[in-house]
Image (spheres, rainbow, N blue to C red):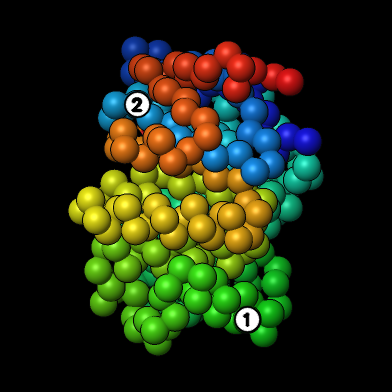
Amino acid sequence: MTLVRCTDAARTFGHGDQAVVAVHGCTCTVEPGARIAITGSSGSGKSTLLHLMAGLEVPTDGAVEWPEFGDSAVERSRDIAVVFQGPSLLPALTVAENVALAAVLTGTDEAAADERAAAAMETVGVAALADQLADTLSGGQAQRVAIARAIALRPQLVLADEPTGQLDAATGTHVLDVLLAAAAETGAALVVTTHDPTVIGRFGEHWQMNDGRLVVPAEEGVLR
Ligand code: ADP
Ligand code: MG
């Protein structure tokens, strides 16, 4: 069973002289239960690869497939949750509304979405913030709420883009604990990009992006 399969997947932005190859042909798979950390310097293509895996970017060459999830973006949006690199909450909505919204937008009825949101906020430890407006949160709180929103979807795959990037070391460690515990509780596979080498040891697989090229240890990322 494979959740995501990238086959020589590439993404170029712009054309002609202006073209930037963000990701050269990447070949890799994500299996259920995976715990993958992708490292690489700034501009090495981590976010672009994650967006390709999420289906948010379309490859300009090669292919990205989701054998378990059906072909349409709507179907995939129920199974794949993304935690974005920067602020991503809607500031004028409460924490509870932010967490429930993605589930509602992907077709969960409102009562069920509220229940899932409550459970996700409990898991992530932000239940006490439920009625606060999102723009009153600290960076660490906002990142935990974004994680709650992701797991409220009950996804099979969570893709988190530098989830600890904006946080101090202690808060970052806590947010990572929360993310790993939430993935364990919901059974989701987890892929994170990170600058932080201390994060790597907590993940079973370590992939590296180097100038748009993915270096996956041979025994891990090759097509099986
Ligand atoms: P990372 O997440 O590792 O910092 P990115 O995937 O964000 O790397 O970017 C890889 C390269 O692609 C960079 O050179 C970046 O400037 C470029 N890039 C990323 N997104 C876009 C875009 N939407 N338009 C043009 N260039 C982009
Ligand atoms: Mg990035």
Say which residue appears at 65% left-offset and 43% top-offset. 33
Looking at the image, is 216 positioned above or below residue 130? above
Mark nearer the N terminus (2 vs 1) = 2
Q: Is mark 2 within 8 Å of ligand 1?
A: yes
Q: Mark 2 and mark 1: span between their CA atoms?
A: 38 Å
- Residue 130: x %, y % from top left: 42, 83
Q: Quadrant of the C terminus?
A: top right
Is residue 103 toward the left or the right of residue 202 in the image? right
Q: Which residue is mark 1?
A: 115
Amino acid type, label 1: Glu
Looking at the image, is 133 positioned above or below residue 5? below
Identify the disc placed on residue 40: 2
Q: Quadrant of the N terminus?
A: top right
Q: Residues within 10 Å of mark 1 (few under 14, many from 20)?
A: few
Say which residue appears at 24% left-offset and 56% top-offset. 170
Say which residue appears at 51% left-offset and 66% top-offset. 149
- Residue 185: x %, y % from top left: 60, 61
For residue 168, say whether it is visible. yes
SS of the residue under disc 1: helix
Q: Nearer the viewer, residue 134 or 151?
A: 151
Amino acid type, label 2: Gly
For residue 85, say whether it is visible. no
* In contact (CB < 8 Å): disc 2 and disc 1: no
Say which residue appears at 41% left-offset and 75% top-offset. 126
Q: Which image quarter: residue 171?
A: bottom left
- Residue 143: x %, y % from top left: 36, 61
- Residue 51: x %, y % from top left: 51, 39
SS of the residue under disc 2: loop
Looking at the image, is 102 positioned above or below residue 157? below
